[in-house]
Image (spheres, rainbow, N blue to C red):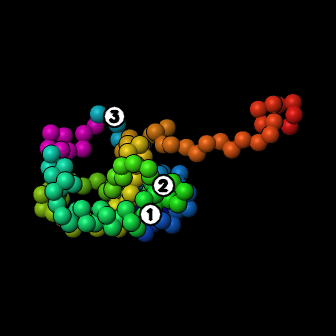
Amino acid sequence: MMKTTTSIRTYSELIGLPTFEERFRYLKLSGRVGEETFGRDRYINQLLYQRNRDWKHIRNEVIIRDNGCDLGCEGHEIHGLIIVHHMNPITIEDVLNLDPKVFDPEFLISTMHRTHNAIHYGNADLLITAPIERRKNDTCPWRH
């Protein structure tokens, strides 16, 4: 499943992707390190996240819906801080006007900090990968 032609990312499409890697590719933005989102006006979105009761309520609903899993993917439980990520970038005007899309769970997903950075920078190297499953003699080439 690919992004819609309007490039609006939705939870409904995201959960149709079976693997964590596919979900990451669906969400990645390919930004650059140092590229600012809100710049010096970052305090505006931080006020929303810290003080708005509607945001706190929907944030909790999204975390529960996603079972506290990274990108809502079972087996990728988040141990520590959970970030609720806007799948479609929001603007200062969206926050100041309390645009309904800021609070719509269809455009939100739970993620951990490293995955959140990987999405914004488009860098899969930031993702935590599962440990390699070892088998007897797998490091011994003459015993295969």
> Can residue 44 be seen here?
yes
Circle 3: element type = loop
Q: Residue furthest front?
A: 79
- The residue beneath circle 3 is 33
* Range shown magenta: 35-42
Query: Contact, CB < 8 Å: mark 1 with mark 2?
Result: yes
Give the Cα separation between the discs numbered 3 and 2: 26 Å
Residue at (48, 43) in percent of width and height: 127
3 or 2: tag closer to the N-terminus: 3
Number of other residues with Cα within 10 Å of mark 1, as a class: few under 14, some 14 to 19, many 20 or more = some
Outermost residue on the left side: it is: 96
- Is 106 displayed left or right of 134 in the figure? left
Q: Position of residue 53 (x, y in %)?
A: 18, 64
Q: Which residue is mark 1?
A: 67
Indicate whether 54 appears above or below 112.
Answer: below
For mark 1, give the secondary structure.
loop
Query: What residue sits right under mark 2 in the picture?
Result: 77
Is residue 138 found left or right of 12 in the rendered image? right
